[in-house]
Image (cartoon, grey):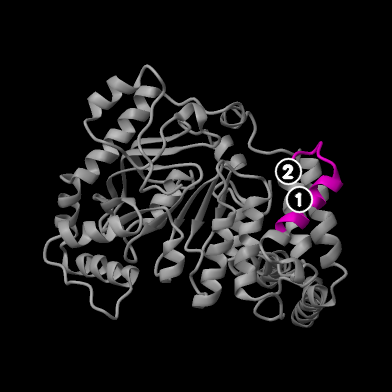
Amino acid sequence: MSASDVKLEVPAGAAASTADTMGVPGSFADLTLLNTKGIRVTVRNLTYTVQSFRDKKETAVLLNDVSSMFNPGEMTALLGPSGSGKTTFLDLISGRKTVGEIDGVIHFGGKAPSTRFLRRHTGYVEQFDTLIPALTVYEMLMYTAELKRPLEESAESKEAACEKLLEELGLAAARDVLVGSEMVKGISGGQAKRLNIAIALITDPSVLFLDEPTSGLDSFTANEVMSVVKRLNTDDVTIIATIHSPTAYAFSLFDAAMILCSGKQVYFGPNGKELVDYALDALPGIEKKSDGHSDIEWLIDVFTRADRDGTADTFATVYRSSDLKSRVDAALDAVDKIAANPDDEASRKLQVDSSTTVPFSHALWTMFKFRTRKNYADGEYLGPRLGEKVFLSFLIMTLYWGIGDDHSDANVVNVSSALFMWTTVGLFVYFLTLVTYGRLYLSLTGDYTDVVFC
């Protein structure tokens, strides 16, 4: 069921009054909320401001008055030029922004989402991989399952869930292949992207966020990845993806699209012919599509040129006064009037009282089981670390041998230097490790909710 051909429906008894209030024939989604299996995400008048980098006394508006609706069973594309606010919008609705001022309303299933719900029942696939190179594909997935699936679930059930995902995402052949890194040969880029998606799906999320899932992939692999995502788009899963420059086929898989330019909303509605017709008929001063352009290539050119030429404000003004925007507002009004009535399973998820499913002790044991044991059995891991310590210890010994025997005042500086080197050299090593694995480190902290640790 696509977003473009579904009529607006409301529960019996409310249909007439709601239809009269809206005054529009239909909308993008089935609003019979009593029949909704999943969780609908609604955003209304969202504005996001942060402190300006150029002048700390001023603020910069990164998103301005954005409204939209994301429905279970549908896949929505967030489009726009680089710097238009796509990832910012995705991070805001997924609860990953911890700075700045947010105005507007973000609802999941008609309620403001708690941090506990967002951490436990949504999945986020980052643009860049945050995988552990020393683990195999299966171990990486099982590691995440041990950390994020319920403690009372049996090991056999977790293993079966991992095997099922590997099969569904076409990773069964790479089950026992190391993830690898720049230095160690491992899985391909497309397989790494699909493994990231599998990690997000292992907890059966109600809402799946993807940040540019096709970036860095060739057209065949990009189509393959998006086809896999589309197959996973069941009636009870809402999928929202930023996508920078999709292929025509990959873009055709999306049910709806939202387009941003310079932080302003210039389109939200059905994908396909209605989007192209809107651009051709409503937007002023645009070049007509040539024979050599696909629809998506032409659309990206149109909105990128508007962003560069400073006509994004004009496009945003046209959209705000369009019938399309009226339909969006009418649909959002209908949701507010009907109120959200998700099914029992969705209600249980929205009322979750903990952001984790396992205690810290189990998480620590899991890390030792999958990472520490494997690291200390790996010569490539241990060799540089032990060798470095031995070399630095020998170097410090040769520099300061016997220096402590001299207790004169003139030798205090040398003794202090020896103590300083002795206590801080190890810290320098760990600081470099944090820089090297910066994104993984962020994933382990409370600012990021998707992957590796509880």
Pointer 2: residues within 10 angstroms few (<14), some, or many (20+)?
some
**Magenta-tinted stretch:** 149-165
- Marks 2 and 1 close (CB-CB < 8 Å): yes
The percent coordinates of residue 242 (x first, y second) are: 43, 58
Judging by the rendered image, the residue that carries numbered circle 2 is: 149
Name the quarter where the C terminus is drawn: top right
Q: Is residue 409 left or right of residue 265?
A: right
Question: Which is more N-terminal, label 1 or label 2?
Answer: 2
Tag shown at residue 161: 1
In the rendered view, tell whether residue 438 sits above or below residue 57. Answer: below
Give, as a three-letter code, the residue at label 2.
Answer: Arg
Q: Residue at x 23, y 25 (%)?
A: 21
Instruction: Say what secondary structure mark 1 lies in.
Output: helix
Classify residue 230 by image quadrant.
Answer: bottom right
In the rendered view, tell whether residue 237 sits above or below residue 352. Answer: below
Q: Is residue 246 visible?
A: no
